[in-house]
Amino acid sequence: MPTRAALWNDLLDSLLALRDRVLDESEKRLAALDHQDPGLRLHPGVRNVVHYLVLRSVDIRPLQEALAREGLSSLGRCESHVLDSIERIIAVLRAATGKARGRASDASTTRDDEDASTLRSNTEILLGPAPGKRNTRIMVTLPGERATDLAFMKELLTSGMDIARINCAHDSPVEWAAMARTLRVARQETERPCKILADLAGHKIRTGPLATEEGVLHLRPMRDHRGRVVLPAHCRAAWKGNAQSPLPPVDCQLLPLETNRPPEVGEVLRCMDARGKERRLEVESVTDAGVTLSCPQSVYLMNGTPWQSDQHRRRHGHIAGIPETPTAILLAVGDHLLLTRDALPGAAAEPDHHQPARISCTIPSLVERLPLGQKVWMDDGKFGAEVVSQSPDGALLQITVAKPGGDRLFPDRGLNFPGLPLDLPPLSDKDRADLDVIVPLVDMIGFSFVESAAHMRALRDALSQRQATHLGIIAKIETAQAFHRLPEILLAAIGRQPLGVMVARGDLAMEVGPERLTEVQEEILWLADAAHLPVVWATQVLESLAKRGMISRPELTDAAMDERAECVMLNKGPYIGQAVHTLDDILTRMQGHQRKKFALMRALHWS
């Protein structure tokens, strides 16, 4: 058994060797970076990232365990101040062993306290000031249908929204501008700061269109366990004179009515529904935007269905404006699906003609590059498949993952090809056109499907051409390629303009596999911490609450861990206001227990 003095000497020698390796290998990497961009090596975030990358190229677990047994720091939280952490342990062991100071490092530039201040400063520049009661910001995706709803925007702000997200994959420039205008008014009236992020759509890799069928609007009343109606079916209706007016969201679909004047409250509209059953729709409310109708029975309505007022015989019309419904393809494990290059509407399988189901891909060039055996995920993991053959028509997939009995595949659903280099231009034509619109409206840009340093430089050039280098950039890590190249992506922008990282967990899970997602998202957090950059934690946070008004226990645990990021993103939904309020409460409580990887021990009081 070695003496403690001998053990300390061994630990000191190991740490000195580790420190020297970090310094020597970092110097080579920094020199290469300086050759590409003179002066870049002087940025403390750049230097610390390089130090961290060298440190993590070594397996130091035995050293960590030995340090912990001696009551010393195990380097388990050294991401943001690598050399400073090593030097501090070396200093303690030198004092304990009486050894003189040797080679000096530049660790003074990355001290723990200074690094924490740098991260706070970078976060405030990009994401705005933290609310007084918590450190983690809340980002909310704005729904296009509420673009002009001032009361809704004020509710989000007072509930805890710190950053508003405009998703350029949805809506149009008209809605985006309206969102920004309404939010500016809401900020003034609530006196709450709120920055705006515009998320570029990127190259939308999705399923193409399917054939459509006649639209049917099915309204259902709510019944109890005995089948008694406890809440009638409701729908929102517009009439011919103002069919273009925006309608506030309700629990049902839009039902336009064509008539010369709007009905009155209490009036009953009689019709024969699509099944030939007589139904009575009562007018519950009337506004400039439309009317609310209710019915205690189930109703199937179609375009052209005539209606007649019970109170005013001359008031009549017919149903219009119900959109056609896309068909869906039923797929089960073992089924085949042809992923086509053409943009023709897809269709279900035709067994009699030996034709598999078919659907197109919105980026045809990817289809012909799919190798045999390539894994394919569809609709956020609802379906898994594998490429079994290639033909001039497209890639034939065999379904390997689907729920028992099969499920339906719809148009405009995400496609993921794990491990396949996309090799797409960094910015689509739509992205460049959208930048022209959104640059004057927002504070930062979300960069979708960024996969390399060249991609990052392309966005920075596009912003420079629009005199918008002041705008922040949030690099969305959505693919395995982006994860593996994250160091070069960050080094291509650190120190040039405000920068952050988004962990896009939905697409990332499809890319790296759900089993590895936890590991990957941790590594992203660590690397961003080393770069002193804020992290946005995104995708499916409190999703059940935002969409259905019900919260699950796993979502609560997940939300509690969001405190480790500088910002958490919520997606839109009918109950988004409640979700913001709940997340605000969770984050406020958790900041007394957790900061990054550091568990805090505030006083507890058990009875």
Image (spheres, grey):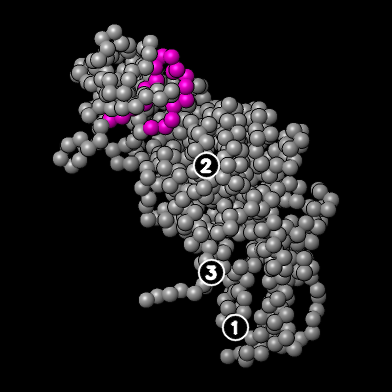
Q: Residue furthest left?
A: 226
Residue annotated with mark 1: 70
- Residue 154's label in the rendered image is 2
The answer to whether residue 182 of the structure is visible from this angle is yes
Which one is in front, 119 or 348? 119
Residue 481 visible in the current orientation: no
Q: Nearer the viewer, mark 1 or mark 2?
A: 2
Which disc number belongs to residue 599? 3
| Dot placed on the residue nearer the N-terminal end, 3 or 2 | 2
Q: Are marks 1 and 2 in contact (CB under 8 Å)?
A: no
* Location of the C terminus (image quadrant): bottom left
Q: How far apart are marks 1 and 2 (CA)?
A: 54 Å
Q: Which residue is drawn at 52% across and 66% down?
A: 592
Mark earlier in primary sequence (1, 2): 1
The Cα–Cα distance between marks 1 and 3, rounded to whole angstroms, is 20 Å
Nearest the eye: 435 or 376: 435
Give the mark, 1 or 3, whose residue is nearer the N terminus: 1
Range shown magenta? 233-250
Name the residue at 29% across, 8% down.
314
Image coordinates for residue 308, horizontal then vertical, percent: 27, 13
Question: What amino acid type should be assigned to the residue bearing mark 1?
Answer: Glu
Element under label 2?
helix
Q: Which amino acid type is shown beneath numbered disc 3?
A: Ala
